[in-house]
Amino acid sequence: MIEKNKKKVIEKIESGEVKIKSRWFFLARKLGLQSGLALSVILLIIIVNAFFYYIKTNNLLSELHYGPSLWQEVLHFFPYDLVLIGVILILIINFLVRKFEFHYWKPFIIMFLLSALLIIILASILLVFDFNERISGFLEDCGFRVPFMSDFYIQRCGQIPQ
């Protein structure tokens, strides 16, 4: 049986139906997928951190306690662009994770919840260690303007809370 399958594979290779790919192709693909996954996770951590920072600097959580009319104000100032970017990054991460073999080890919902919890914890750690205040101070001190970051940290988040 194995010999039959071996002969069929060899015949397909010789006829040109199946093309042999180099080991470097698979290594490059794996490296690209891992790099893309790592970059997406890092960007998602930074986006979630920026979301937390925006909520903190604009006092959106404290305004929720003053009545239903302020819900409209909170929803008006809610950072929908950060949420949209976060959802897109989650979809990209989901696509990339499905390309790896460790995707089949655990149920998807458990992997998703653990990774979401890890991302929220890491974003919170960045918030606690004044990552955003340092970026905001650097952007105010430097002479050049970074397109999204300068708008976000200087104009949308306003002054650094003391």
Image (cartoon, rainbow, N blue to C red):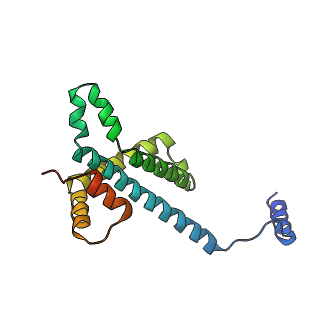
Q: Residue visible at 19% across and 53% down? A: 159
Residue 134: % across, % down: 22, 62
Seen from the viewer's position, the closer of residues 39 and 30 is 39
Seen from the viewer's position, the closer of residues 159 and 125 is 159
Q: Residue visible at 48% across and 40% down? A: 109
Q: Residue visible at 28% across and 48% down? A: 54
Task: Tell whether 75 sits left or right of 67.
Answer: right
Quadrant of res 25: bottom right
Residue 85: % across, % down: 44, 50
Outermost residue to the top: 68
Seen from the viewer's position, the closer of residues 157 and 115 is 157
Residue 55: % across, % down: 27, 44
Residue 93 position (above or below residue 8): above
Residue 35 in view (yes/no) = yes
Residue 142 position (above or below residue 128): below
Residue 52: % across, % down: 29, 47
Quadrant of res 114: top left
Q: Residue visible at 58% across and 67% down? A: 29
Task: Tell whether 94 sits left or right of 159.
Answer: right
Task: Tell whether 124 sits left or right of 34.
Answer: left
